[in-house]
Amino acid sequence: MRQSAAWRAGWWVPILLGALMLAPLAGAQDATPAASPVTDGEVITSISRDDYYATLDAAYAFEEPQFEGGQLILADTTDIDTVNALLSDDIPTAYIVGLMFESLVGVSPIDGSIVPGLADSYEIGADGLTYTFNINPDANWHDGMPVTADDVVVSLDFATSGESVYAYTTQMVESIASYQAVDEKTVEIVATDLLATFLYDVPGTLAVMPAHIWGEVPFSEWQNDPGSTGQDPSRVVGSGPFTFVEWVQGESATLAKNDNYWNPREIPNVDEFIFRVLPDENTSVQALTTGEVDILEGIPPAQVADVQNSGVAEVEIYDTLRFNWYSPNELMPIFTDVAVRQALLYALDRQLIADEIYLGFAEQANGTQPVLSPAYAPDEINTVYNYDPELASQLLADAGWQDSDGDGVLEKDLNGDGQIGEDEVLTFEFIYSEGVAIYEQMVPYMQESWAAIGVAMVPQAVPFPTLQQRADDGDFGIALYGFSWSPDGGQGIMFRCDSFSPQGFNSMRYCNEEYDALDDMQQRELEPDARVDLLIELSNIVNDDAANGILVFRQEMSGATGRVHNFFPSGFTFPWSIPYIWVEE
């Protein structure tokens, strides 16, 4: 039996979470995912695969394919950065690896609840701690080798080692007491405590990798292994409905239909799935409306009507777990002052951003819990940062920030040495991902708004991989991102003291021991309503502290051409329906 390794410093990544618990469905999404059930001394058994499929068939009007074969092309402005699912570092990468690799459990596109994945079923023991997963007897790797419990063990060894770039190491180590292969197709994972979100945090987050490919590779070498870079396609071996063909960096990634996929219902209808990288959002929209590509997620708000009126593509608009936010880096002394962080939020008219920049496809973010979260409760938020530049200026003045040299930028003697150093002036570099149309509108507005209260931001658009690396290294002033939560409502991965990037997503380097203690409690609260109350309280702690700047909770707008059938985007898991899609000749 393996004991989970002690946490050691390493460096970070996002985001597989089942088959990608991070994207956008309207309509049948009123339900919220339940926490792990209380056992009351009885064994709990999961939903069966047949029962899960029955819920899908009831929720979605699947068309019988009229044609099999052809290509399905999805466009994005950001390239993937690996073909190793355990190194997945961003949403585009997660789309691709989520079609090749799988987790023990998945996420329902209907309501975000836990459903079968590689495991047909699981049982929670009478102790409430012991989870036993029964891997499908036919599950196999793309090279024909069977998927076994040893594969899960090797993947858990990597995830808990702290010797690699993995964003969820802390989460895994804190959740897992031990794990072992019971037999070839059965794996047992024992939780450290009665944990409400264990199924999301461990089997739903962990991508299972083949032990016969990765078992002998030192964890520190996984990132640059040819099986991660795609340079050796024979090492890119998954268990999912698509197999790897090639990755031409900066241009495209190509996957092929897995005719031997172990799950017959989800053998793809298309022969080939192509992820095409286009230079910017305008080019992507044009490619969709001319039929050059088939699917585009993230249509800019200003171009939704153009796509809808194109006669070529239709747009699905739906609520999500996503938001746009900025990260004030507390390695810079100016951002350790809560008054500064609060003033930055008060200085922004986030309702204007939602209405005029997102054109109503977003709402001002009050608190940290987005629309589809079980803890979405904007009326219970203590501090609502409505636009109030006068209050922003007053907060700064009361905290001792002043413009003593008349240059329009505030400063403060933070060190008490009677002098103003470079790190004691409210000026900083503001980095964001290039090629995002909405940022090109939003960043100048933010710059102007902050300048009005004596804060000088220097904007710098950078390639997304550069943004990620600088966030990991703490080499930035403020960074602007998009993000998506897990459906379970837990947010410690971004706010806990032990979740600093790269071992988590706390790129702010924010730390509040009260938050951590309460987060420990919510993880162990199995009564759903009581847990929601704790999640709301946690949201208030970090929101009162202005730990980060969540601007808007946004909807997603995904477009698909008329030749695409059975495309059902979801606010809980984006690529789930791709195996069901069929395209016209």
Image: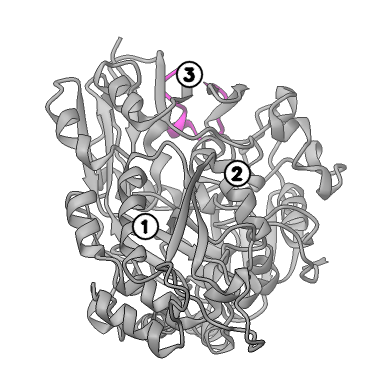
Q: CA distance from mark 2 to mark 3?
A: 30 Å
Residue stretch in magenta? 255-271
- Residue 132 point in image, percent of width and height: 63, 63
Please name the residue shown 42% across and 32% down the image.
Answer: 76
Secondary structure under badge 2? helix
Say whether disc 1 or disc 3 marks the residue closer to the N-terminus: 3
Q: Which callout, 2 or 3, points to the residue nearer the camera? A: 2
Residue receiving disc 1:
447
The N terminus - image quarter:
bottom right
User: Vertically, is 493 above or below 114?
Assistant: below
Q: Position of residue 507 (x, y in %)?
A: 58, 64
Q: Main secondary structure of the magenta part?
A: loop
- What kind of element bears circle 3? strand
- Marks 1/3: CA–CA distance: 44 Å
The kind of residue tagged 2 is Thr
- Residue 327 position, x and y percent, is 49, 64
Q: What residue is disc 3 on?
A: 272
Number of numbered discs:
3
Q: Position of residue 562 (x, y in %)?
A: 22, 22
Check whether the beta carbons of the residues at disc 2 and disc 1 lie within 8 A of each other. no
Q: Is residue 510 among what the camera can see?
A: yes
Between 402 and 348, the one nearer to me in the picture:
402
**Which marked residue is nearer to the observer: mark 2 or mark 1?**
1
Q: Amino acid at mark 1?
A: Gln
> What is the three-letter code of the residue carrying label 3?
Glu
Left or right of 475? Residue 407 is left
**Residue identified by numbered label 2:** 466
